[in-house]
Amino acid sequence: MVDACGAIDVCSTVHAMPDLITSPEAAAMLGVSVRTVHRKIEEGRLTPAKKLPGPTGAYLFNRADVEALAQQRRDAEQRRRAS
């Protein structure tokens, strides 16, 4: 969704696609900072479903992908505690 100034409205885009979440939402689900989410993208450990246009365009993620990564993190933590 583009406003009158030509800017992309992240909120409208996310609400139009309810299975997509923002970087801050992904960070909260993973229990990490937004910067860590961006590092995971750089490392290839998390793939955004979409990047909004522009040099500072927001990353959007499939909720299911982030939930799966969060579950992997929880499982790994449980294994570490058990050993």
Image: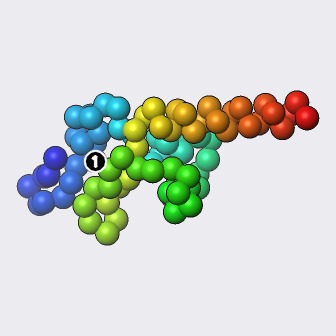
Residue ID at (38%, 53%): 59
Check disc 1 and give the amino acid type: Val
Residue ID at (31%, 69%): 55
Q: How many marks?
A: 1
Instruction: Give whichever of 42, 31 is nearer the camera.
Output: 42
**Vertical placement of residue 15 versus 5, above or below:** above
- Percent x, y of residue 37: 53, 53
Residue ID at (31%, 31%): 18
Instruction: Give whichever of 23, 4 is nearer the camera.
Output: 23
- Percent x, y of residue 71: 62, 32
Residue 35 appears in the figure = no
Residue on which disc 1 sits: 10
Residue 53 appears in the figure = yes
**Vertical placement of residue 50 versus 15, above or below:** below
- Percent x, y of residue 63: 43, 34
At numbered mark 1, what does the secondary structure look like: helix, strand or loop?
A: helix
**Vertical placement of residue 1 versus 42, above or below:** above
Check disc 1: other Cα within 10 Å, few if <14, some if 14-19, many if 20+.
some
Residue ID at (55%, 34%): 68
The quadrant the C terminus occupies is: top right
- Percent x, y of residue 47: 45, 50
Report whether 45 appears left or right of 61.
right
